[in-house]
Image (cartoon, rainbow, N blue to C red):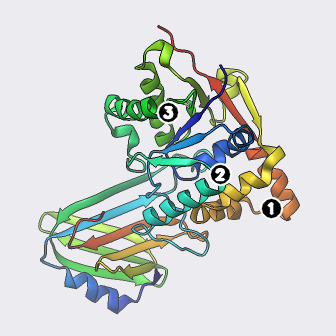
Amino acid sequence: MEIKNIVVSFPHPDDESFGTAGLIYESNQKNIPVTYLCGTLGEMGRNMGIPPIANRESLADIRKKELKDACEHLGIDYQLLGYRDKAMEFENKTQMAEHIKSILEEIKPSHVVTHYPGHGVHPDHNAQGAATIEAVRLMEPDKRPVVWAAAISHNYIEELGNPDVVIDAEKNFEFKMDAIMQHKSQAEGMLEKMEEPSEDIMIKELKERLGKEEFYIWHFNE
Amino acid sequence: MKPIELEKVKDILKSYQNKDVYVHVETTNGAYASHFGNKGVNVGAYIRNAKVKYIESDLKGESGAFRAGLKLEAGWIYAEGLSDYEVTESNQLLLAGHDQAGRLTVALQISEQPFK
């Protein structure tokens, strides 16, 4: 199906940049609008910046601002769903699906990107992925957008086979890294952890980790 | 946040004694501990806005690794590895520990109003 507009449904400020900045770059080139549905504010994250620029109570507002800046850089709209970081899997899944469905019915995307339940690594990823897929399932079959599910577990290829859609984010890697770096409180922790001996090696390593954005087309079995 | 000053923070803890307060207690090794670097199982717990009244409080240990204990009428609240503190504009006491990369490892926070 032709891509007309895309909704990205992930739980944390920065998931959109890590997971879909390459896809967003290509969509911008084709004037395809993208909206990010951000589940939480990532307010329970443990990265506070290096040196720390946040504490547990200020992190929510700091990440909200980082999200705004990142979405401006990416050139996309975003909506906050208002769930609590780390607690999404304990919410009523049907209610969450209805909530997401009501937003999808307003935006009417042709494509929805979310995490592949069971392959999202973070429990919030799995929970929002499952709720988003359920939201689409609850729609009339002929009104359903196409769902692209992102799997990031260690064993996803083994279990799911090769992905259906592969975006080469390496081509526009600066755009992606600039988006990630808008999330200052979080990105520095990631870069610090890598401890690579030189910038060149670090960029090579980053390209290996973040250079491909892969998705599986979700099939609904009626 | 800034490094814990023992006597000062002890006094702040005492100032909440025998009052109804809201606490946030947390510890974590990160949501990706088992995904990156094989650091075993993800471990974490948090309780947010538990309403308690404590009757005794103290802070022990040394710079970079303090322990706080709050004695309740029927139990205890305990946290260790606390290194930093801050009193926010809304008069909340935040105590936290961080690892070498500045990541939060433990938190104990007290407020007379619920945390947001």
Cα separation, mark 2 vs mark 1, equals: 27 Å
Cα separation, mark 1 vs mark 3, equals: 33 Å
Q: Which mark is residue A74?
A: 2
Residue picked out by circle 1: A196
Q: Determine crowd level at label 1: few under 14, some 14-19, many 20+ residues with C-alpha closer than 10 A.
A: few
The residue shown at (20%, 79%) is B16
Residue A102 horizontal/vertical position (percent): 38, 32
Which of the two marks, 1 or 3, is nearer to us in this view?
3
The residue shown at (43%, 62%) is A60
Residue B79 horizontal/vertical position (percent): 35, 68
**Most distant residue in the top direction:** A222
Residue A13 horizontal/vertical position (percent): 53, 53
The numbered mark, 2 or 1, whose residue comes first in the sequence reads 2
Cα separation, mark 2 vs mark 3, equals: 22 Å
Which of the two marks, 2 or 3, is nearer to us in this view?
2
**Most distant residue in the front direction:** A31
What chain letter is assigned to the residue under label 2?
A
Which amino acid type corresponds to the residue marked 2 in the rendered image?
A: Leu
Q: Does residue A103 appear anywhere in the picture?
A: yes
On screen, residue B66 versus residue A63, left or right, reads left
Question: Compared with residue A153, is residue A18 higher up or lower down, i.e. above or below?
Answer: below
Question: Compared with residue A62, is residue B40 higher up or lower down, i.e. above or below?
Answer: above
Judge if badges 2 and 3 mark residues of a common chain.
Answer: yes
Q: Quadrant of the N terminus of chain A?
A: top right
